[in-house]
Image (cartoon, rainbow, N blue to C red):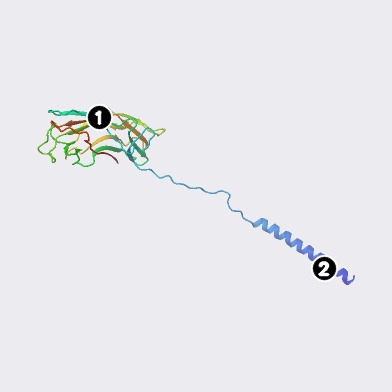
């Protein structure tokens, strides 16, 4: 066999060896290659919201400046009583419990301060005189003003709000109570027992409010007082 033949045979054998090694590498690689998992574990947390009480409209939007307009009185030489309604279709008393209070809660109404008064330019009267009549100033009252407010949530209408499955069961409306300085500084509007829904929202309307006005209280059109709703978990 000539030199040229030996050279051609050597090249053919070399190509065969390279091809064989390449096949072995591919086979070996195919057997050992590890793919990443095609399953991704998505995680998320839903935190409990905040227990809250508010005044909202029919669309559950916070009312910017809620108010209660009391009945109009005429100057009198005798003590008289005016009335009003707290909570309406456009100004609902609204409680939201987004899994924040699992043992119940209490919503209350109080004045902005125990020393608050029905204020007018140059003349005022009280909302929490602690005398028995609530009309004339009591000897133990600190502001020398007569007048007393009574709130009666029991006559109001309680309903569920936006929740799909909550109920009014185990939620109680407060009873008729008068503000008495130093004794009754806040009045319970609603109380939820431990067995009430841990997740839910409710609205209350039609709470009765009455106010005794002292005798000879000067005429004015700008008497007002700020009252504040609050809520605490049990």
Say which element carries label 2. Answer: helix
Disc 2 target residue: 10
Relative placement, left or right, of 38 versus 29 is: left
| Callout 2–callout 1 Cβ contact below 8 Å | no
Cα–Cα gap, marks 2 and 1: 113 Å
Q: Is residue 229 above or below residue 79?
A: below
Name the one closer to the observer, 178 or 142: 142
| Disc ID at residue 193 | none
Disc 1 target residue: 84
Q: Earlier in the sequence, mark 2 or mark 1?
A: 2
| Residue at point 79%, 66% (across, down) | 14
Residue 128 occupies quadrant: top left
Task: Say few, some or many: other residues with alpha carbon within 10 Å of mark 1 (under 14 / 14 to 19 / 20 or more).
Answer: some
Name the one closer to the observer, 124 or 188: 124
Quarter of the image that includes the N terminus:
bottom right
Quarter of the image that includes the C terminus:
top left
| Residue at point 82%, 64% (across, down) | 12
User: As drawn, which residue projects farthest toward the left?
Assistant: 139
Residue 201 appears in view: yes
């Amino acid at each position: 066999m000539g030199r040229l033949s030996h050279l051609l045979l050597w090249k053919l054998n070399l190509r065969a060896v390279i091809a064989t090694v390449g096949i072995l590498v591919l086979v070996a690689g195919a057997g050992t290659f590890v793919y990443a998992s095609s399953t991704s574990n998505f995680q998320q947390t839903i935190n409990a919201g905040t227990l809250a009480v508010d005044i909202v409209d029919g669309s559950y939007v916070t009312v910017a400046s809620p108010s209660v307009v009391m009945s109009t009185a005429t100057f009198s030489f005798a003590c008289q009583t005016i009335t009003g309604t707290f909570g309406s279709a456009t100004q609902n008393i609204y409680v939201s419990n987004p899994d924040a209070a699992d043992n119940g809660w209490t919503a209350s109404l109080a004045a902005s301060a125990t020393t608050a008064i029905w204020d007018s330019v140059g003349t005022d009267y009280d909302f929490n005189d602690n005398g028995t009549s609530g009309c004339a100033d009591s000897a133990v009252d600190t502001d020398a003003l007569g007048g007393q407010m009574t709130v009666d949530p029991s006559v109001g209408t309680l309903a569920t709000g936006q929740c799909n499955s909550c109920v009014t069961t185990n939620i109680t409306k407060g009873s008729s109570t008068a503000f008495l300085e130093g004794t009754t500084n806040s009045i319970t509007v609603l109380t939820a027992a431990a067995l009430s829904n841990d997740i839910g929202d409710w609205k209350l309307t039609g709470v009765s409010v009455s106010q005794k006005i002292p005798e000879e209280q000067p005429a004015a059109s700008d008497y007002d007082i700020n009252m504040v709703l609050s809520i605490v978990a049990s």
